[in-house]
Image (cartoon, rainbow, N blue to C red):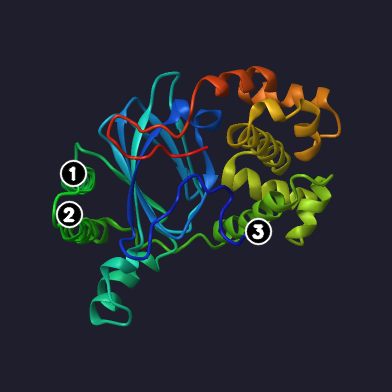
């Protein structure tokens, strides 16, 4: 079983230089949003165009153009447009261990208080206050360095991340972690991994609940608190996602609708068509025609790879 992701939208950081920058046009994402997921890297998101709603740590943050957010590692989070408009987010992902040597004095003093504080899931970066304004200056510097890739950009990036880290330490919450929420989040991660592994099987809500050793009602409560959606909806979305990805990554002409339905856990093509239309706003056949005309691995205006489906 894959251990750590509900869905991996990005090719995450490399060991040599564990910092990556992504251009995310939400209108081009699956279902026009980044679904609930988590990863070992910390994440900084800056809204470049439109307005975004970011869910993290059981809270929802509305971000207008120019606002940002920092999300701690291994926190379930999602991003969607706040309105029916083009929404573009620049996302920085970095491994925090890149900034500190293991077991050093600096690690104990500056790394552990933030990375080890389970109660701090996310911090909004508001350009109208002093803390947010300064933090966003560092974010812009990181973006500039990684888009230009001039000589020494790695050192410049590390320096700006350290400065950004210091701003986070000034603002971090000292409130105790919500033990109940953290327990719920852990259960959702385990259940989501089960769904990802068994989406093609005829699994039920009972099966999902049993995978985390709780009752059906407790399983639903955990999902609703952490993701605002019931577990069976996550199963349906996973199946639709997998079928869309198969059309995206294969020759669409070689895939029958009935074959896709069966391979992705639907017992008949009619039901598959209905669920696909519910979430995608079109039938599988219509979606297949669209992807024949466009290639999703194109480069965005900044010259960096699009987040892939």
Quadrant of residue 111 in the image?
bottom left
Residue 199: give x, y in percent of width and height: 74, 45
Residue 283 visible within the image:
no
Give the number of the mark in front: 2 or 3.
2
- The residue sitting at 35% across, 30% down in the picture is 88
Q: Give the distance between the C-alpha atoms of the residues marked 2 and 1, in whole angstroms.
A: 8 Å
Name the element at disc 3.
Answer: helix
Judging by the rendered image, the residue that carries numbered circle 1 is 148
Binning the other alpha carbons within 10 Å of mark 2 as few (below 14), some (14 to 19) or many (20 upward) gives some
Q: Give the distance between the C-alpha atoms of the residues marked 2 and 3, in whole angstroms.
A: 38 Å
- The residue sitting at 68% across, 35% down in the picture is 243
Identify the disc placed on residue 153: 2
> Would residue 219 appear left or right of 151 to someone viewing this image?
right
Q: Quadrant of the N terminus?
A: bottom right
Mark 2 touches mark 1? (CB < 8 Å): yes
> Would residue 84 appear left or right of 145 to someone viewing this image?
right
Note whether 268 is above or below 188 in the view shown. above
Binning the other alpha carbons within 10 Å of mark 1 as few (below 14), some (14 to 19) or many (20 upward) gives few
Judging by the rendered image, the residue that carries numbered circle 3 is 190
Residue 36: give x, y in percent of width and height: 54, 44
Residue 274 visible within the image:
yes
């Amino acid at each position: 079983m894959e251990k750590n992701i509900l869905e991996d939208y990005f090719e995450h950081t490399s060991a040599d230089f564990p910092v990556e920058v992504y251009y995310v046009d939400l209108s081009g994402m699956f279902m026009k949003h980044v679904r609930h997921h988590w990863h070992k890297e910390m994440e900084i998101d800056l809204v470049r165009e439109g307005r975004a709603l970011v869910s993290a740590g059981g809270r929802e943050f509305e971000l207008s153009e120019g606002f940002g957010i920092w999300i701690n590692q291994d926190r379930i989070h999602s991003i969607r447009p706040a309105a029916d408009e083009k929404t573009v987010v620049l996302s920085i992902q970095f491994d925090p261990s890149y900034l500190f040597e293991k077991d050093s004095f600096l690690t104990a003093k500056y790394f552990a208080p933030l990375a080890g504080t389970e109660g701090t899931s996310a911090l909004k970066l508001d350009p109208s206050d002093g803390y947010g304004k300064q933090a966003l200056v560092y974010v812009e510097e990181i973006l500039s360095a990684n888009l230009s890739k001039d000589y020494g950009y790695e050192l410049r990036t590390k320096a700006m991340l350290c400065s950004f880290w210091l701003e986070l330490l000034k603002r971090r919450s000292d409130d105790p972690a919500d033990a109940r929420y953290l327990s719920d989040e852990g259960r959702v991660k385990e259940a989501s991994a089960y769904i990802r592994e068994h989406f093609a099987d005829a699994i039920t809500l009972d099966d999902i609940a049993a995978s985390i050793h709780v009752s059906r009602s407790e399983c639903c409560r955990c999902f609703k608190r952490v993701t605002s959606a019931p577990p069976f909806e996550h199963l349906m979305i996973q199946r639709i996602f997998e079928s869309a990805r198969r059309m995206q990554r294969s020759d669409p002409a070689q895939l029958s609708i009935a074959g896709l339905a069966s391979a992705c856990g639907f017992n008949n093509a009619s039901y598959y068509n209905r669920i696909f239309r519910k979430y995608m706003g079109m039938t599988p056949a219509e979606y297949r025609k669209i992807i024949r005309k466009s290639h999703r691995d194109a480069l965005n205006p900044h010259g960096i790879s699009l987040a892939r489906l």
